[in-house]
């Protein structure tokens, strides 16, 4: 069964002092993949600056805006339409060849192929004081262990808005046991990688129809690579596997590779950004 | 050529020219006042105020006694004072630095030597007895720079932009000098029985602009207010006249914008218009209201500069 | 000829433990230097003081300076220049030149490989950590094919002469190596000061670097471009290498741009000229990867151009050197250069690498632990000289500490013999005489699809502090004109 989604992304920036010209880059267009068929995008901005589409260094589509105007506030609105195919996250054999799976992750070819998603970054480093925080049980399959990790994080960490930001290191999350979807995801990536499983940070939209956690911002979850299966999405914030409610935009090593809005401008004084996202579906 | 670098070249030209006029104005005023025929022109306070007026600082004659060494330092070597000689050459060099790949090594080396000469000039010597040596060297070094600009650069758009800067600045500085000396002549008249039109200040004015000898050759008479102003404003053959500067600006803008099409928003159009207005002015009508004439020409020069910025230097 | 026959070298002290490039162990002048030695000997030391100050003034007036920032004001300084040239014999130069090209080619193939199939790692020739622990490995460059397959268009190779008389490479610089403009200004300065000596030697000219560089840049033009528009991008006039950037732009006759002069539209790059936008095809960049594009790399970079990397990746503009080359001038990669050369070119290294012991290999570890006093111990993953221990300067206690560190984490350390740089007579202002000073040599190599060029000269850097081995200009080093003799 296919779902037809429409997503509205809004951002408004307010600056205390005048800004003379700016560049923005949005990483908010849903990815085209085997479960997502992209239908269309409509983008507007309050400055009426021309819009360009491009591709960033990791191969994801971006929207770029450049203005030479002087402004204090600017508003952007993007609406997307896409078709999401119903996915069954359990569409593979879970327990076959347990040992073979682990063996494979140890081969040099595997480690070379997935080097990017095995390396830790400042945002996905486990402090040395917390080593062995989550150890895989080698009698169980990789998938089962990842599911266990997913639930473990879901239970350990409490969803709480406002206590962390996009640069909060994991040591704080582990100590205070609270955070938002980025923090849940960074922790998942870090622990999966520590156990030798390639894992990437995914940013996207969550259809919240069913009372899932997340807020009116972009959602984040993780994708781990399981030998002989492929990339599987885990949403530790909600303790579930990624499903047809998850609309993927981009992936990377951590948040920094996926930040939805990058701006290059010069201003003194404070500035405020308000994001809002609406995801609605019709079947 | 890059728009930013064009802007640098334009201002390099302007600052080189500015350096020269400030230095020469100090020199001529100071030294001709020493044996001026009457008391006010001879007065040290009068001369120092005149120098300050020329660099845009109006000093009220009653309220403030100027200290000679401080005043000379301020206009000559004070880095804090934006209009000083040292700042003008520093800015000229900064601008040359940014455009270093476009100008000749010879020109750059001369600017650089010039800069080091000024920066390393002992302050103590300058304010006590170095004024003549310093200002003569500065004016001669600017002459060398002009020679290097003309003699070592391609006469293309780089040259045209530098020359536009030089000529717009020259017209601006000549007008400022005229304004200052006109003001001095007004102040000096009356109390000493000296008639305005025959004031000693006209001779000083002509010397300040290195035009005294040629003016005498042309008019064969002692300078008066009318003949001096006519020579310095309207005579197209006097290399320091406003008219000559406008003619040059006109020639050089044609290199940057050779189009013959009618475009009332272009810099070339504005330059042509201002120049044409001047071509058919006569000195009597200018003298009737010299103040508004001065304001008008300064206004026009600013407009040309702004228009250039918008059309060519926008980056 | 004995060196005490003449006045100018009469106070020259030879330390027999150092390798002197002009005097042999008996104090005789090497054949190559004989004529030069005679010519210089005709001058009195007063002549020298005079010539030296003239040469300094010439650099100063030409504005070949860099700025030093003090608390109160900025000062302009020149890079000290020594009037006694270094001569390289054609046979020796031949080795240097072939060696530098060999390394450039091998590094280029290495870069291609680690940004594509990574065969050298899969086959176990170099360890995975060389890229996975490198902050300079740019994942954005994976599977990108730079025009002509060239990454390191311009390389600077730092070479020393050891006390065995052989040349060794200390470092390969393939990000934005600088110094080539000093090669040329040193030659100009020496010609002005002592033109007579050039009549007696047939040295290669060094002025052909810029035309070769332009030739290379033009050859890397993006597809579909007929006559490419090349530019040099600089961080700006306050950068210590700005003179070099403007020199190269001027001699190549191309624009010298800053980030703010460029903009990207629909993935094409343009520069803002007095007559509007003009497309740019090839950029010789003198800014580091992380500053190239604030939308892709460091967001706080004001030096770069928003959108530049996307334009590059699309193939609409060429960057030289390619982004991501920095990974190959990491210290750890250096230690594998013999293997890298062998693997990609199936050749033996022409220039020696300093022998490196990998503490990760048990037998080498044992040797290192037993011989720490004769070795330099370096962590593989740190740059800028951090964590380096020089064995013969350590106390017994300190040696024990290092031993424990190495034993605890052997993968983290490599060890090298302590190298001794050759010395060269250098005029020292304070003592107004010639003294022995350590020197190295930076060569400049240009690599294109069908082009290999090494500037016949290079920059001889000299450590002006007595006994100092560090020749970097940031550490108060000077330089010498370097003559490569014709055969």
Image (cartoon, rainbow, N blue to C red):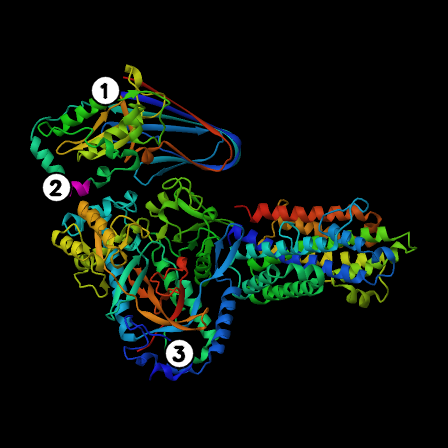
Q: Which mark is residue C9?
A: 3
- Residue C447 % position (x, y): 30, 60
Name the mark on residue C234: none
Q: Chain of mark 1?
A: A
The residue at which mark 2 appears reads as: A107
Q: Residue B308: x, y in percent?
A: 60, 48
Q: Is residue C460 above or below residue A146?
A: below
Task: Determine if marks 1 and 3 fall on one subunit.
Answer: no
- Secondary structure of the residue carrying tag 2 is loop
Which residue corresponds to mark 1?
A155
- Closer to the chain start, of discs 1 and 2, is 2
In the shown orientation, is residue C155 left or right of residue C342?
right
State yes or no: discs 1 and 3 in contact (Cβ < 8 Å).
no
In front here: C293 or A142? Answer: A142
Q: Is residue B61 left or right of residue B129?
A: right
Q: Quadrant of residue A133?
A: top left
Give the SS element for disc 1.
Answer: helix
Residue at the spot 21% in from the left edge and 53% down from the top edge: C414
Q: Nearer the viewer, mark 1 or mark 3?
A: 3
In this rendering, does residue C2 appear at all? yes
Query: Does the magenta stretch mainly form a helix, a strand or a loop?
Result: helix
Which span is picked out in magenta? A107-113
Q: Chain of mark 2?
A: A
> Disc 3 on helix, strand or loop?
loop
* Residue A110 magenta-highlighted: yes
For the residues labelled 1 and 2, the Cα–Cα distance comes to 33 Å
């Amino acid at each position: 069964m296919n779902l037809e989604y429409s997503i509205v992304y809004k951002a408004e920036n307010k600056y205390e002092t005048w800004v003379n010209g700016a560049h923005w880059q949005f990483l908010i267009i849903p990815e085209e993949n085997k479960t997502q068929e992209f239908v269309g995008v409509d983008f507007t901005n309050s400055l009426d600056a021309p819009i360009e589409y491009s591709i960033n260094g990791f191969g994801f589509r971006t929207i770029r805006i450049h203005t030479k105007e002087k402004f204090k506030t600017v508003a952007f609105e993007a609406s997307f339409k896409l078709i999401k195919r119903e996915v069954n996250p359990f569409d593979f054999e879970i327990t076959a060849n347990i040992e073979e799976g682990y063996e494979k992750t140890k081969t040099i070819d595997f480690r070379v192929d997935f080097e990017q998603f095995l390396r830790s970054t400042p945002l996905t480093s486990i402090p040395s004081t917390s080593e062995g925080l989550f150890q895989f049980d080698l009698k169980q399959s990789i998938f089962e262990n990842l599911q266990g990790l997913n639930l473990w994080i879901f239970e350990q960490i409490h969803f709480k808005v406002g206590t962390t930001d996009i640069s909060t290191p994991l040591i704080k999350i582990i100590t205070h046991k609270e955070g938002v979807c980025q923090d849940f995801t960074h922790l998942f990536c870090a622990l999966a990688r520590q156990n030798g499983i390639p894992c990437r940070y995914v940013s996207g939209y969550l259809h919240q129809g069913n009372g899932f956690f997340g807020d009116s911002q972009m959602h984040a979850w993780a994708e781990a690579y399981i030998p002989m299966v492929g990339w599987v999405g885990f949403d530790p914030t909600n303790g579930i596997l990624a499903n047809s409610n998850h609309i993927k935009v981009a992936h990377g090593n951590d948040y920094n590779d996926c930040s939805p809005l990058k701006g290059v401008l010069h201003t003194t004084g404070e500035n405020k950004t308000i994001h809002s996202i609406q995801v609605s579906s019709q079947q | 050529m890059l728009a930013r670098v064009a802007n640098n070249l334009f201002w390099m030209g302007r600052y080189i020219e500015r350096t020269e006029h400030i230095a020469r104005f100090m020199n001529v005023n100071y030294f001709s006042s020493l044996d001026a025929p009457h008391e006010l022109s001879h007065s040290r306070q009068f001369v120092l105020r005149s120098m300050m007026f020329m660099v845009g600082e109006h000093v009220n004659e009653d309220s403030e006694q100027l200290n000679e060494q401080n005043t000379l330092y301020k206009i000559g070597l004070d880095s804090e004072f934006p209009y000083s000689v040292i700042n003008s050459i520093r800015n000229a060099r900064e601008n040359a630095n940014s455009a270093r790949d476009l100008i000749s090594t010879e020109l750059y080396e001369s600017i650089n030597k010039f800069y080091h000469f000024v920066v390393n000039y002992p302050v103590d010597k300058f304010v006590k007895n170095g004024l003549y040596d310093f200002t003569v060297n500065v004016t001669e070094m600017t002459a060398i720079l002009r020679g290097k600009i003309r003699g070592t650069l391609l006469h293309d758009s780089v040259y045209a932009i530098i020359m536009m800067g030089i000529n717009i600045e020259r017209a601006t500085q000549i007008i400022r000098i005229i304004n200052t000396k006109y003001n001095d002549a007004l102040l000096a008249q009356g109390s000493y029985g000296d008639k305005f039109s025959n004031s000693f200040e006209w001779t000083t004015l002509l010397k300040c602009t290195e035009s005294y000898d040629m003016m005498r050759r042309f008019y064969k008479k002692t300078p008066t207010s009318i003949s001096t102003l006519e020579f310095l404003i309207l005579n197209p053959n006097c290399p320091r006249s406003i008219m000559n500067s406008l003619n040059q600006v006109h020639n050089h803008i044609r290199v940057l914008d050779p189009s013959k099409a009618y475009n009332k928003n272009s810099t070339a159009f504005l330059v042509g218009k201002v120049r044409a207005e001047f071509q058919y002015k006569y000195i009597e009508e200018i003298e009737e209201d010299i103040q508004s004439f001065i304001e008008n020409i300064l206004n026009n020069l600013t407009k040309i500069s702004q228009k250039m910025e918008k059309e060519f230097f926008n980056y | 000829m004995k060196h005490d026959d003449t006045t100018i070298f009469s106070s020259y002290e030879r330390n027999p433990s150092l390798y002197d490039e002009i005097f042999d162990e008996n104090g005789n002048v090497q054949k190559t230097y004989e004529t030069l030695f005679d010519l210089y000997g005709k001058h009195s030391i007063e002549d020298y003081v005079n010539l030296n100050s003239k040469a300094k003034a010439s650099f100063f007036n030409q504005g070949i300076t860099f700025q030093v920032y003090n608390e109160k004001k900025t000062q302009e300084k020149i890079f000290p220049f020594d009037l006694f040239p270094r001569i390289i014999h054609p046979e020796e130069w031949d080795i240097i030149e072939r060696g530098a090209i060999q390394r450039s080619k091998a590094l280029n193939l290495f870069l291609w490989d680690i940004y594509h199939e990574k065969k050298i790692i899969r086959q176990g020739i170099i360890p995975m950590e060389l890229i996975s622990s490198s902050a300079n490995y740019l994942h954005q460059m994976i599977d990108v094919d730079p025009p002509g397959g060239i990454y390191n268009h311009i390389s600077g190779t730092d070479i020393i002469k050891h006390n065995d008389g052989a040349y060794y490479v200390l470092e390969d610089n393939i990000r934005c190596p600088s110094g080539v403009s000093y090669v040329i200004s040193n030659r100009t300065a020496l010609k002005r000061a002592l033109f007579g000596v050039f009549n007696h030697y047939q040295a290669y000219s060094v002025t052909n670097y810029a035309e070769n560089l332009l030739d290379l840049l033009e050859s890397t033009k993006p597809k579909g471009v007929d006559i490419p528009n090349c530019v040099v991008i600089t961080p700006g006039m306050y950068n210590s290498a700005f003179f070099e950037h403007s020199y190269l732009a001027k001699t190549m006759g191309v624009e010298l741009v800053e980030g703010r002069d460029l903009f990207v539209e629909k993935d094409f790059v343009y520069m803002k000229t007095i007559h509007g936008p003009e497309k740019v095809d090839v950029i010789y960049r003198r800014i580091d990867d992380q500053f190239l594009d604030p939308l892709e790399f460091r967001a706080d970079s004001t030096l770069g151009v928003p959108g530049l990397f996307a334009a590059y990746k699309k193939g609409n503009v060429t960057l030289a050197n390619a982004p991501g080359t920095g990974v190959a001038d990491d210290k750890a990669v250096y230690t594998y250069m013999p293997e890298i050369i062998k693997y990609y070119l199936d050749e033996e290294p022409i220039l020696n690498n300093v022998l490196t012991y990998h503490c990760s290999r048990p037998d080498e570890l044992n040797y290192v632990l037993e011989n720490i006093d004769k070795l330099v111990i370096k962590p593989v993953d740190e740059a800028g000289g951090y964590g380096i221990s020089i064995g013969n300067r350590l106390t017994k206690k300190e040696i024990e500490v290092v031993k424990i560190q190495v034993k605890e984490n052997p993968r983290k350390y490599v060890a090298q013999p302590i190298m001794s740089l050759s010395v060269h007579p250098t005029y020292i202002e304070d003592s107004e005489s010639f003294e022995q000073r350590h020197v190295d040599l930076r060569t400049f190599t240009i690599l294109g699809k069908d082009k290999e060029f090494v500037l016949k000269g290079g920059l001889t850097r000299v450590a002006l502090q007595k006994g100092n081995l560090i020749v970097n200009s940031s550490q108060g080093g000077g330089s010498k004109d370097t003559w490569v003799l014709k055969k």
